[in-house]
Amino acid sequence: MLSILIVDDDVQICQLLRDYLAGFGMSVVAVSDGKAMAEALGKNSFDLVILDLMLPGEDGLSLCRSLRTKSDIPILMLTARGEAMDRVVGLEVGADDYIVKPFEPRELVARIQTILRRARGSHESIQEKNEAAFGDWRLNYISRQLVSPQDLVIPLSNAEFRLLSVLVEHPKRVLTREFLLDATRGRDMDVFDRSIDILVSRVRQKFNDDSRTPSLIKTIRGEGYLFDAEVSR
């Protein structure tokens, strides 16, 4: 049974989702703020977190950013604000996907299943590999972490790990945004134009790569991105 943590101070929505998700074989723990979220994560293991943007005390964006530094657990951002900038910021701080209130419960289930399927698929596709090296960097497939030339471990979100894995598997090739979208997020999501660009920007930051003159992930204007490195396994 999948275990889902919902962080939302709307009691009615929490009850609705608890009942609805139970019909799809998911158990739900619902909490109303960041403190309770931390306590729940400390006591239980969850497959995914549904995190509301507007919360009492620390808001969802701050909680998402903090959680992403400690864990690669999938995060679905739940928000009443559908503006593109809110979605951009949510993805930038590490959310795997977002859904705007009001929403159809069945759509939420579909998004949960897509996120978890992608996460499982990434794991299964690399389960016989341990590590890939490019330059002085290493991508560890077991821990799903990036290791710097100074042997510093750099955590990656699920989406960041999937993107970097795809780039590493296709070095020295121009990959279109559509290809990267299929490989990392899924075409069945409502995706706006900047979603892949945001993800690339986040991965570049892990390398401390200058976005104006990147050395590893290069922008090919009008076509997509190219991972400019020799990869060994």
Image: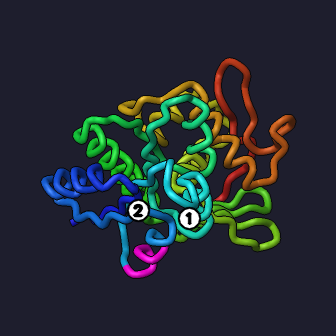
Q: How is the image coloured?
A: rainbow
Residue 7 lies in what quarter of the image?
bottom left
Which three-letter amino acid code belongs to the residue tagged 1? Leu
Q: Say which element carries label 1.
A: helix
Instruction: Please count the marks in the image.
Output: 2
Asked if labels 2 and 1 touch by Cβ distance under 8 angstroms, the answer is no
- CA separation in Å, label 1 and label 2: 16 Å
Residue at 23% x, 65% y: name it: 27
Picture coordinates of residue 44, whole percent (x, y) = 36, 77
Q: Is residue 177 left or right of residue 209?
A: left
Look at mark 2 in the image and give the residue it sits on.
Answer: 32
Residue at 22% x, 39% y: name it: 106
Q: Is residue 23 left or right of residue 13?
A: left
In which quadrant of the rendered image does the N terminus lie? Answer: bottom left
Report the front residue among 32 and 179. 32
* Residue 174, magenta (yes or no): no
Instruction: Tell me the number on the disc at residue 101.
Output: none
Report the front residue among 195 and 122. 195
Picture coordinates of residue 32, whole percent (x, y) = 41, 62
Residue at 45% x, 65% y: name it: 128
Which three-letter amino acid code belongs to the residue tagged 2? Ser
* Residue 40, magenta (yes or no): yes
Q: Is residue 15 above or below residue 141?
A: above
Label 2 crowd bin: few (<14), some (14–19), many (20+), radius 10 Å: some
Report the front residue among 130 and 106. 106
Look at mark 1 in the image and give the residue it sits on.
Answer: 67
Badge 1 or badge 2: first in the primary sequence = 2
Which span of residues is magenta-colored? 38-43
Residue 120 lies in what quarter of the image?
bottom left
